[in-house]
Image (cartoon, rainbow, N blue to C red):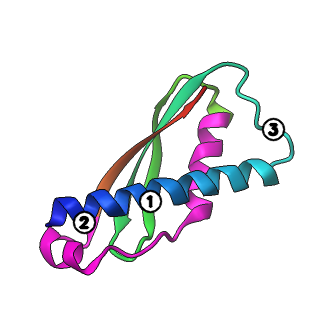
Amino acid sequence: MVDASFSEYDGQLIDVVLAAVMKEQRESSGDFYPGAPGAVTIRFNLDDTGRVSEPQVMGHTLTEPLGQFFLNALQHGAPYGPWPDAVRSGYGAATRPVKMTFRYD
């Protein structure tokens, strides 16, 4: 049950994080222009209340400022929704590591 609950939660999390990226892009001062397709991978801890901690860019094929852009978007969009009750009771920890890759085509 935990895996199915996280699967649903993660789908919603991805949608909300992408909305945060789009909002960050709209609010940026025009600095967002990757120039070429690429990706940024970010690792962070997500707690059961939806808070993000210890985010860091693990790697990218874009520029450093664009890596920071995606990191900022992730942080500005938090907190995200709390975990479902089934996940909270079955996961065994209040925080889990998450790795997310943002692809820009």
Q: How far apart are marks 2 and 3 (CA)?
A: 37 Å
Q: What stretch is highlighted in magenta?
A: 66-95
The label shown at residue 31 is 3
Residue 65, by quadrant, is: top right
Residue 92 in sight: no
Residue 99 vs residue 73: left or right? Answer: left
Q: What residue type is labelled 2?
A: Ser
Residue 54: x and y in percent read: 42, 57
Q: Which amino acid does label 3 sit on?
A: Asp
Residue at the spot 22% in from the left edge and 72% down from the top edge: 87
Residue 83: x and y in percent read: 33, 73
Asked if the magenta segment contains residue 67, the reply would be yes
Q: In this view, does 78 lie above or below 44?
A: below
Q: Nearer the viewer, residue 55 or 22?
A: 22
Q: Residue furthest right?
A: 29
Q: Residue furthest top?
A: 36
Q: Do the residues labelled 3 and 1 touch (CB within 8 Å)?
A: no
Main SS class of the magenta portion in the image? helix
Residue occupied by mark 1: 13
Q: Is residue 56 above or below residue 84?
A: above
N-terminal of the two: label 2 or label 1?
2
- Name the image quarter holding the C terminus: top right
Q: Is mark 3 on a helix, strand or loop?
A: loop
Q: Which of 104 and 63 is in front in this view?
A: 104
N-terminal of the two: label 2 or label 3?
2
Residue 81, by quadrant, is: bottom left
Residue occupied by mark 2: 5
Q: Distance between the residues labelled 3 and 1?
A: 25 Å
Residue 75, by quadrant, is: bottom right
Asked if the magenta segment contains residue 28, the reply would be no
Q: What element carries label 2?
A: helix
Residue at the spot 14% in from the left edge and 67% down from the top edge: 1
